[in-house]
Image: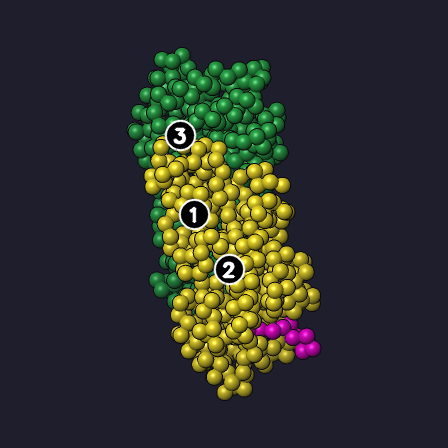
Chain colours: A green, B yellow
């Protein structure tokens, strides 16, 4: 299938760039003795999860239970679900998933651990639980090493649970702070007789600086497989290495300085990033996508020497690729501008 | 089904509020001799399209061809598609849709009209085309009355097309400016022997001021069926009339002032609005959802006298309800806190 036969808006994935992005990260991990456990939220495709494992990743990370189930259905058998799983319905599903995968989860509070302990009671097949630590990102996580020891102790005391280590989604660029935080927690846990086997951190922006946090032995990058404007703005990668683009058509040229695309917030997503506008048009780098309505992208061409015509097709690097793949039912896999395959995004919209 | 049996995150639709919102708009339209043609992008459910027609709407509006096809599949037979439809693939689909519905489209440029004229050639069953006008919103549309006459003349000259009128998505709150713009265009078209039969405008924020633009005879409101924080910030409706909420669970309370929800940008969408934060928590109105990551909502509770516990379930009025329904595969229809039915969102993700 030729790229010209793909209707718009659509998502194109450049397989050569995927290969290069994955290899660069795995090479870095190998050079620094780091275990990779990629986050599948970015691609949501079992085939890329398999590719990541074939290159050396130990398993995968999924953020929601439904996403993990879809990955297990796709053949993944080692899944980390770094989320507080609460409620009878989800705990029953988690228990079922535990029967067919090597599974681990997190907790940052006692009620969540109590839920795990009540549902998982078999000492011969315990659920591995890591304690989530807030090392400065201000999201989930215990606030102190002392709290981490308290929760690890509760996990360790539950017959059907195993304390498996620490997990954090660290703040970007603060590697020294994160290293100190984690070292203090590891020391406190070791003193309490519960040395953490795994210390898992993540985030594509600091992936190539992971060695600055030697306290961690596992890394969970997500966006690195594709890259996007946000990552480039944060200092990771370059625009010409971004593997995911949205193919769009110019549907209107109301004024000499304005073009309208058939791709709005339902195709490109409204997420902002450090750079100007809502996406980078590869063939018109000076153009600025100034605003998105739901089904239209509004483009300012005033800085462009050459300007697109009505009907012209463009490739756009979005601000945030992970939320774009969540808007489409399938993506087109492409090599050398030829479409090799159409891949359904099997874990799209798995919110629960 | 009880609301307590609904897992989170999920979308709840309060049917009593839907009924009241639709009735208020239809009563206003009836009182002012205005034809309503609701935009289905908000709900994406044929059942609500039928309800809107049963109350008095003349037909529906859909923004993408795929959305229109899904509505035709659901039984809708009078569809307005106010979009420049370009390219052989879409024109073939448009032609097929024209065989089974009363269909009209728009154009704001000559290449789009040329595409319609080449594909629609049957004078006994012409395609109705309205000319889109940019009355100040800065999106699609011709810039002057003169351009509108030029395009109407081209449409009128094509054997398989009929010039059916003018369409605009007007800027908010500028009713006098829009009235002047449209009156000038109507006068110019009438002088050219092409008086526009339909003059269609839209936008929920100014729905209850539509009578201030007597030049228009058709109105296309979308969000009014549910309402959201953006509409309330823009002066339409009130929070207690919002029919759509996202049901979420508190999964973490890392600090006394912070709660974490299981609903991030993949459930609430990242769209901002005039008000602070990313949604209104009905039972904790002082709480501010300060940030969204993909799967977490971060809540500042510092202004709250009472604070939610881990595991507590909350209803959130989102900033922009239309993009929320595009993220979920189904919604729960509720009356008096009882779930009456689960409705699949049949035109979700119909981007092409």
Percent of width and height locating residue A313: 50, 59
Q: How crowded is mark 3: few (under 14 residues within 10 Å), some or many (20 or more)?
A: many
Query: Tag 2, which secondary structure?
Result: helix
Mark number, residue B224: 2
Above or below: residue B187 compared with residue A345: below
Q: Are marks 2 and 3 in contact (CB under 8 Å)?
A: no
Marks 3 & 1 on one chain: no
Q: What's the CA distance linking mark 3 and mark 1? A: 24 Å
Chain designation of label 2: B
Q: Is residue B13 left or right of residue B160?
A: left
Which residues are drawn in magenta? Answer: B120-130
Residue B176 visible, this angle: yes
Residue A227 image-quadrant placement: top left
Prevailing secondary structure of the magenta residues: loop
User: Where residue B327 sits: x, y (%)?
Assistant: 53, 48
Residue position for label 1: B280
């Amino acid at each position: 299938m030729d790229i010209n036969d793909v209707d718009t808006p659509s998502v194109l994935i450049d397989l050569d760039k995927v290969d290069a992005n994955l290899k660069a990260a795995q090479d870095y991990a190998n050079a620094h003795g780091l275990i990779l456990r990629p986050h599948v939220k970015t691609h949501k495709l079992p085939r890329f999860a398999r590719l990541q494992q074939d290159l050396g990743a130990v398993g995968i990370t999924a953020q929601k239970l439904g996403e993990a189930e879809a990955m297990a259905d796709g053949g993944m058998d080692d899944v980390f679900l770094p989320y507080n799983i609460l409620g009878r319905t989800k705990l029953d599903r988690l228990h079922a998933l535990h029967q067919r995968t090597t599974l681990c989860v997190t907790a940052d509070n006692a009620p969540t651990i109590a839920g795990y302990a009540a549902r998982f009671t078999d000492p011969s097949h315990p659920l591995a639980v890591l304690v989530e630590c807030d090392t400065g990102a201000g999201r989930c996580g215990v606030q102190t090493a002392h709290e981490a020891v308290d929760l690890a102790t509760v996990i360790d005391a539950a017959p059907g649970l195993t304390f498996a280590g620490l997990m954090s989604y660290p703040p970007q660029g603060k590697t020294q702070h994160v290293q100190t935080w984690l070292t203090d927690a590891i020391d406190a846990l070791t003193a309490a007789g519960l040395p953490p086997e795994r210390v898992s951190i993540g985030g594509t922006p600091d992936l190539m600086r992971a060695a600055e946090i030697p306290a961690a032995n596992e890394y969970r990058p997500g966006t690195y497989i594709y890259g996007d404007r946000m990552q480039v703005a944060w200092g990771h990668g370059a625009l010409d290495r971004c593997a995911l683009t949205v193919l769009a058509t110019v549907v209107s040229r109301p004024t000499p300085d304005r073009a309208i695309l058939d791709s709005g917030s339902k195709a490109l997503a409204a997420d902002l990033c450090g750079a100007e506008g809502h996406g980078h048009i590869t063939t018109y780098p000076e153009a600025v996508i100034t605003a998105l309505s739901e089904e239209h992208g509004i483009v300012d061409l005033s800085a462009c020497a050459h300007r697109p015509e009505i009907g012209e097709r463009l490739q756009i690097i979005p601000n945030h690729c992970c939320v774009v793949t969540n808007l489409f039912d399938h993506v087109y896999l492409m090599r050398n501008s030829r479409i090799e395959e159409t891949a359904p995004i099997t874990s799209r919209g798995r919110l629960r």
